[in-house]
Amino acid sequence: MAIETVRVDAQGLAQLAAERPHTLIFYVATMAFVALTLIPHGSRGDLSRQRKIYWGGTFSAAICAFIAALPNISTGLIVAGLCVFCLALPAYFGTQLIKIGDRVVAFESAAALPATADGRDPYTPRVSASKVWWLAVFGVVIGAVNVLGYVIGGDPVAYGLLGLFFFTVPPAVTGLGDGRYRQRVARSQYLQFGIITMLSAGIFTVCYLVAHSVGLRMRQPSR
C-alpha cells in the first residue's frame, strides 16, 4: 500500500511537471525562501540584518507562491497573503523583527515594562495587559464562530463545546489570577472587555467577574 501511494505521488508530480512546470519550480522556490526565514530565529547578530533576511525571504516566498498558482490569479493572491500572514505571526509573537517606521511591533516589549501601584500591572515583565486582552478578543471571536456554527449552522456539538471553552475557562483562570494579585477588572482594559462581553453574550464576563471576586478573597501571592 505504501509503495503504491509513493508511486501515485510520483506520477502526480511527473504530470504536474509536464503540464505546469512553473508551478513545481516556484513551489520549490517558495519552500526555499521559507527556509531562509529560519536563519534570524535565535540569531544574536545585527537586528537590522536579521529583518532584511526575514522579510526578504517572506516576500520572496509570497511572490513565488503567487507565480506558482498562475494562471489562477485569485488563488495566487490568497496563497501569497496566507504566506505573509503565517510568517508574520511567529515574527510578532517571538521576535523583534517587525518594524514599521521607527516603531517595533511585537507581542513582547524589548525592555521590561514598569509595574504600577493602581492595579494595572503588565501580565509579564515584557507583555502588557493591553496586548493580552486584544489576544483574548481574538480567542473569543474564534469561540463565537464555533458556537454560531453549532447553533445556526448545524455543526457537530464539538464545535459548540470548543466555543464554550473559550467563553469559560480562560476568563476563569485570568479572573482568578487578576483577583489574587489585586488587579483591577481586566487590568483596566475596558474596551477589549466590552467587545468580549458583546461577542460572548456576557458568558465570558460573568465567568471572569465571579473568578475575580473569588481571587480577591484569596491570599495574595508573594512576588
Image (cartoon, helix red, strand yellow):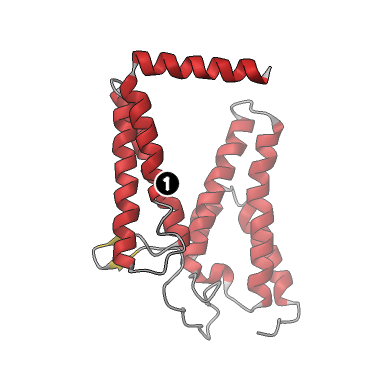
Q: Residue at x 28, y 25 (%)?
A: 73
Position of 111 with respect to 215 (left or right) is: left
Q: 13 or 184: nearer the eye?
A: 13
Q: Residue furthest right?
A: 218
Residue 88 x/y as whole percent: 40, 51
Residue carrying label 1? 35
Q: Is residue 108 left or right of residue 197?
A: left
Q: Horizontal and vertical percent for residue 202? A: 60, 52
Report the quarter where the C terminus lies: bottom right
The answer to whether residue 75 shows anywhere in this view is no
User: Looking at the picture, how far across and down is residue 213, in whole percent?
Assistant: 70, 70
Question: What residue is drawn where x is 76% and y is 77%?
Answer: 218
Kindly identify the residue that appears in the image at 68 percent across and 48 percent down. Answer: 165
Circle 1 SS class: helix
How packed mark 1 is, by other alpha carbons closer than 10 Å (few <14, some 14-19, many 20 or more), is some
Classify 130 as above or below 169: below
Front-lying residue, 212 or 50: 50
Quarter of the picture holding the N terminus = top right
Q: Is residue 131 above or below residue 145?
A: below
